[in-house]
Image (cartoon, rainbow, N blue to C red):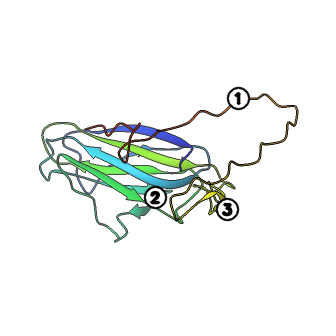
Amino acid sequence: MSREIRAFECVIPAGTAKAAPVTFSLAMPARIVDQIDIRIPPGPNGLMGFQLTSSGAQIIPYNAGAFVVANDERLTWPLTNQITSGAWALTGYNTGQYDHTVYVKFLLSLPGQPAGPGGADLIPADLISSDGAEAAAPEPIPDTGGTDIGLAAVGGTGPAGAGFETGA
């Protein structure tokens, strides 16, 4: 799971030629990019395109010289093994008569830390019962002098998903 979200708004001016695109810095500290979310509001209608780059080198889309051209779309790209320097940029053109904005969100993890649980068991295997029987309660965590924050039950009985909002 990502630890940070970095958000950028890149307004590509009207009349920016494809041969002379504008570049916006999306610089951040060194991070692992787990996912990139991009929103293009309605309006460009094929007259605007962009690339994600680093130090002048094209990263997305992968094919050299290509641009992402979108209109009224939300794009999501889960990524692995991308640059971790934080030296990202957006390069774009806009041959239309109106400025257009590209909204970019990076979902990030810190270097040296796994993006997710890293394969660790969130619930110890010996507490999971395949027959529906209640498993034994876990042993209490020994007091190490830290602050006891307690644990509260999540969800509850009822239909699957009880306790969670769907956003719908």
Mark 1 or 2 closer to N-term? 2
Viewer-nearest of discs 2 and 3: 3
Q: Residues within 10 Å of mark 1 (few under 14, many from 20)?
A: few
Whole-percent x and y of residue 122? 62, 54
Q: Mark 2 = which residue?
A: 56
Amino acid found under the numbered disc labelled 3: Asp
Amino acid found under the numbered disc labelled 2: Gly
Q: Mark 3 = which residue?
A: 126
Whole-percent x and y of residue 110? 63, 49
Counting labels gives: 3
Vertical side of 90 occupied by 119: above or below: below
> Contact, CB < 8 Å: mark 2 with mark 3?
no
Whole-percent x and y of residue 77? 38, 58
Q: Which element type, helix, strand or loop, lies under badge 1?
A: loop
Vertical side of 9 occupied by 113: above or below: below
Q: Residues within 10 Å of mark 2 (few under 14, many from 20)?
A: few
Amino acid found under the numbered disc labelled 1: Ile
Q: Residue at x 44, y 49 (%)?
A: 89
Vertical side of 8 occupied by 131: above or below: below
> On the rendered structure, is 161 left or right of 99?
right
Mark 2 or 3 closer to N-term? 2
Front-most of residues 130 and 67: 130
Q: Residues within 10 Å of mark 3 (few under 14, many from 20)?
A: few
Viewer-nearest of discs 1 and 2: 1
Q: Mark 1 = which residue?
A: 149
How many angstroms separate mark 2 from mark 3 (CA)? Answer: 52 Å
Q: Quadrant of residue 102?
A: top left
Dividing the image into 4 quarters, which one contains the C terminus? top left
Q: Which element type, helix, strand or loop, lies under badge 2?
A: loop
How many angstroms separate mark 1 from mark 2 (CA)? Answer: 48 Å
Q: Residue at x 28, y 60 (%)?
A: 67
